[in-house]
Amino acid sequence: MKIIQKNSPNFDERNGEEVTFLILHYTGMKTADEALERLCCKDAEVSSHYTVDEEGKVYQHVDEVNRAWHAGISSWQDQLNINSKSIGVEIVNPGHEFGYREFTDVQINSVKNISLEILKRHSNIEHVLAHSDIAPDRKQDPGELFPWKDLALNGIGIWPDVSDEDIIKGSLIQDIPQSLRRIGYEASKPKNMLIAFQRHYVPEVFEKGTEGVACSLTKGRLYALQAGHLLYPSRYSD
C-alpha cells in the first residue's frame, strides 16, 4: 500500500526492547490537519508510527525500528514502558471531545492493511490493543465505535467466542476487577477497567447507556476470553 512520509522529530531508541504490541488510537482532534501537525511538532512531544485519515491515506511519522511517543503512562499484564515495545497507529477521528463518529469504510480498510503489514514484519507481536486498554484511567480511544470484531475476522487481534456454558460460568464471576487484571487491565478505579473492556469487547452496552455495569453479556465475554475461547482465533493475543 502507498505510504505518505510525514516525518516527526519525536522519537528515540527502543534500547533493545522487542516489539510485542500493536496499539490503536484515535487522534481526538477536530481535523486531520491539526492532528498531523501536532504529531510532527517538536514542542508537542507526541508521535505515532502511522496515521490513517478518513480518506484512507496512510502517513508514516516514525520508522518502526524507533520508539514513537504515543502510549504515555500505560501498562498491560504488568508490563510498563509500552512505547518501547509497540507500534502505534493513530486513526483520524474527532473523538469523544469533538464529536465522536463512525470510522469510514475506506479508513478501516487501510487500518486493516497497515496492521496486517505490521504484524507480518513483527512476528513477535502478541497483543493488539486499544489505547484505552493500556491506559483505562486516562483514555477512551479508539472507542466503542471501532470495529474490533471485524478486525479479528481479518486476523488482527482476537474476539471472544461465547458459548452457553461461557454465559453460565461467566454469571458466577464474583470479582470482576480481579478477572480483568488476569487479562491484563490495570487502573486506579475498577470501573475504569470495566468500561475499557466494554469499549473493546462489549460495545453494545454504550448503545443502551449501561456501560460500567457488569451485565451478563459482559461477564460471558470476559469468561470466554479468560478461557481462551476465541472466534476467528489468531496467534495474536490481547
Image: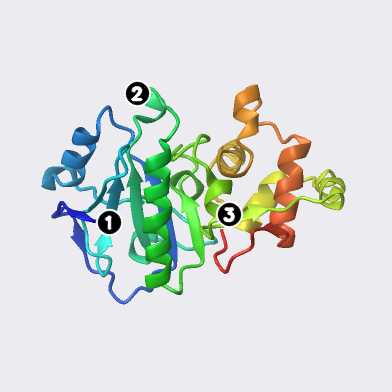
Q: Is label 2 or label 3 in front?
A: 3
Give how far apart the Cα atoms at labels 3 and 1 are: 24 Å
Q: Hey, which quadrant is residue 193 in on the image?
A: top right
Q: Which mark is residue 163?
A: none
Q: Are marks 3 and 1 in contact (CB under 8 Å)?
A: no
Mark 3 or 1, nearer chain start: 1
Residue tagged 1: 49
Q: How many marks?
A: 3
Q: Hey, which quadrant is residue 224 in on the image?
A: bottom right
Find residue 151 and report its horizontal and vertical position in percent. 52, 51
Q: Tag 3's secondary structure? A: helix
Disc 1 residue type (three-letter): His
Find residue 170 and report its horizontal and vertical position in percent. 80, 47
Disc 3 residue type (three-letter): Leu
Residue tagged 3: 153
Q: Tag 1's secondary structure? A: loop
Looking at the picture, tell me which residue is in the foreground, 136 or 203: 203
Residue tagged 2: 98
Looking at the picture, tell me which residue is in the foreground, 9 or 54: 54
Mark 2 or 3, nearer chain start: 2
Disc 2 residue type (three-letter): Phe
